[in-house]
Amino acid sequence: MKEANKRRQQEIHEDTEKLFQLATDLKSAVEKSNENMLSLDVVRKADEVEKLAKRVKEKMKEAVGPAPRTQPLPDTPYPGRTH
């Protein structure tokens, strides 16, 4: 388990580095375009950034685990509550 967490942390780090580079490339490509034309390359870069960001987010969720419930389940009785 500890090894899996260490590997996942390394993957998150590597993916974050890639995400930063892709975002930098995307920014550069957008700056080179004009208001009349965005290249297909810009759209592809944006799509790649989105996919990688989602992958990083999912890995982070795995590392943290599921979010704790903030509200009780509907079937959970409350002390002193009558139905």
Image (spheres, rainbow, N blue to C red):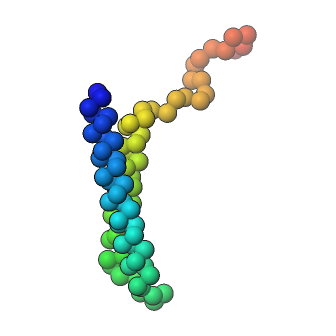
Q: Quadrant of residue 75?
A: top right
Residue at (40, 77) in percent of width and height: 28
Residue 47 visible in image: no
The one nearer the camera, 19 or 65, is 19
Quadrant in which the C terminus appears:
top right
Identify the residue at image location x=30%, y=29%. 2
Residue beneath the point at 30% across and 52% down: 14
Against 17, residue 80 (above or below) is above
Look at the picture and state if 73 lies above or below 22. Answer: above
Q: Residue 8 location, x and y as percent? A: 31, 40
Q: Residue at x 27, y 39 (%)?
A: 7
Q: Is 28 above or below relative to 49?
A: below
Quadrant (top left/top right/bottom left/bottom right) for the N terminus: top left
The spot of residue 20 in percent (x, y) is 38, 62
How far across and down, in percent of the image, does residue 37 sit?
41, 87
How many marks the image carries: the answer is: 0
Q: Residue 9 at what x, y percent from top left?
A: 33, 42
Is residue 56 at least partly visible in the picture? yes
The quarter holding residue 3 reads: top left
Residue 43 location, quadrant: bottom left
